Amino acid sequence: MATERYNPRASEPKWQKAWDAKKLFEADNDDPRPKYYVLEMFPYPSGRIHIGHTRNYTMGDVVARYKRAKGFNVLHPMGWDAFGMPAENAAMQNKVHPKDWTYQNIAAMREQLKVMGLSLDWAREFATCDVDYYHRQQMLFLDFVEKRLVTRKSSKVNWDPEDMTVLANEQVIDGRGWRSGALVEQRELTQWFFKITDYAQDLLDSLEGLDEWPEKVKLMQANWIGRSEGLLIRWPLATPVDGEDELEVYTTRPDTIFGASFMAVAADHSLAKKAAESNPALAKFIDEVRHMGTSVAALETAEKRGFDTGIRVVHPFDEAWTLPVYVANFVLMEYGTGAIFGCPSGDQRDLDFANRYGLPVIPVVMPEGENQGNFQIIEEAYVGDGVMINSRFLDGMKPDQAFDEVAKLLEQKTIGNRPVAERKVNFRLRDWGISRQRYWGCPIPMIHCEDCGVVPVPKADLPVRLPDDIEFDRPGNPLDRHPTWRHVKCPQCGKDARRETDTMDTFVDSSWYFARFTAPWANDPTDPKAATEWLPVDQYIG
């Protein structure tokens, strides 16, 4: 009987070498057996694997080995999500090129993963910073341009004045940049966007087909898309302001219109800007709001603050009733029209705001069977169903009936030959801003010409490669400072022009790698035959 203790260091390299020699884990696209695609979220090459990597890739490996044993043709690939700001910051701190830093880390982590003995198809390995990969990503971008799914427009962004780049909402913590700690500024920048809002309803409808997805995840996705049906209402200004004579408000609760006690607009709303021109205190408040984070989480947890502009609007159903217009820190310009009407009795946020500023609270919906004489709203808004009260001709109706009645009446009323209100479907989903003012990312293949405007790089001229001779001696985008890279001839007129110096958000890189794995050697971004056979992924572990 053997008594020698098992020594994995002695035996595992032998068998791993044998597996590699026989190419046991390399998937064959022409294999006739049923397919099974196992995919884990591919890692950022930080230089060292951690327990989260070990956990995820072990789980995926168990599934992959089980399916192979059951007779499936298994695809279990590995790659690297390799672009991004950490590599650029490392370059500045350690005087090393981002490319060198990244590929050194990839080599170290590859070796660590191989020691684990995972049944990975290393023949399909790629990094998103490989020229071959971002070449195909640029091809996809130009396909989107041809299909008019890319737009360039001005947008409010979170700007880190120290790192000199745009930050996502989630990267703003207590008004400061997550890495630099600098106070974030709200700036208007011209950015590139993917028009994902064109697919808002399709995305929502497709959730119904995800039979095996957890209901919690599907609900999160539905809320993120955020479809709502409401009314766009025009509220006349009591006194016009610099040519503006009305305030448009989108609301999902027009039934509560008789409970309105204030209007609130975003800090970037045109009325707010005009009012601030003659009010230094308001201008200071607006500047403070612009330094806040703009994520939903930040707005929900922030103290509700406002500033009375002195502007008043006229109630659509009562010309003698006017309401104050506040600039509020919880209203986003990016949602609806950047303006709301506040009904404190039916919304906790509005109630907190009204109580803070001494505004009226008018109950307009109460539970059925409740005594109206005893029903009060003090510290907690009533957000349930019930019957309408204190709402004139709506009294006694259910809220959905009152919604339709308000819509019908305001659609019949007109201001300047336009209806006072119109039904509207709105989505919380926003177009995807992909511009980043950094070097270590996929170059956006567009060219700026004074005569021709913004034109795409011809596909024959791809890839637009990142230059290697870059200086990281100061913050900001090194591509803006490069002496030659940005200078190019216009492909349409031949005159001097300049390259786009923004690079793509790294989430673009990781949004399609699963499809590239099906045929990473293809000249096009994907091989339709291989993608059709392998997709969708059968088991994903994030």
Image: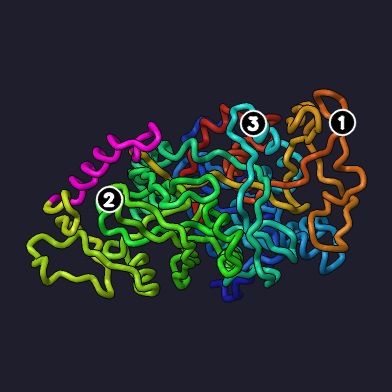
User: What numbered label is drawn on residue 489?
Assistant: 1
User: What numbered label is drawn on residue 318?
Assistant: 2
Task: Identify which amino acid the numbered label 2 is placed on.
Answer: Asp
Q: Is residue 507 left or right of residue 498?
A: left
The quarter of the displayed image where residue 404 is located = top left
Quadrant, the N terminus: bottom right
* Front-most of residues 374 and 432: 374
Q: Residue at x 73, y 49 (%)?
A: 441
Q: Secondary structure at mark 3?
A: helix
Task: Residue 179: give x, y in percent of width and height.
Answer: 68, 69
Q: Is residue 140 left or right of residue 253?
A: right
Q: Secondary structure at mark 1?
A: strand
- The part of the chain drawn in magenta is 397-422
Residue that label 3 marks: 145
Q: Dot 3: few (<14), some (14–19), or many (≥20) neighbours within 10 Å?
A: some
Q: Secondary structure at mark 2?
A: strand
Mark 2 and mark 3: Cα distance apart in space: 49 Å
Task: Identify which amino acid the numbered label 3 is placed on.
Answer: Val
- Check the image and report above or below for 202 versus 333: above
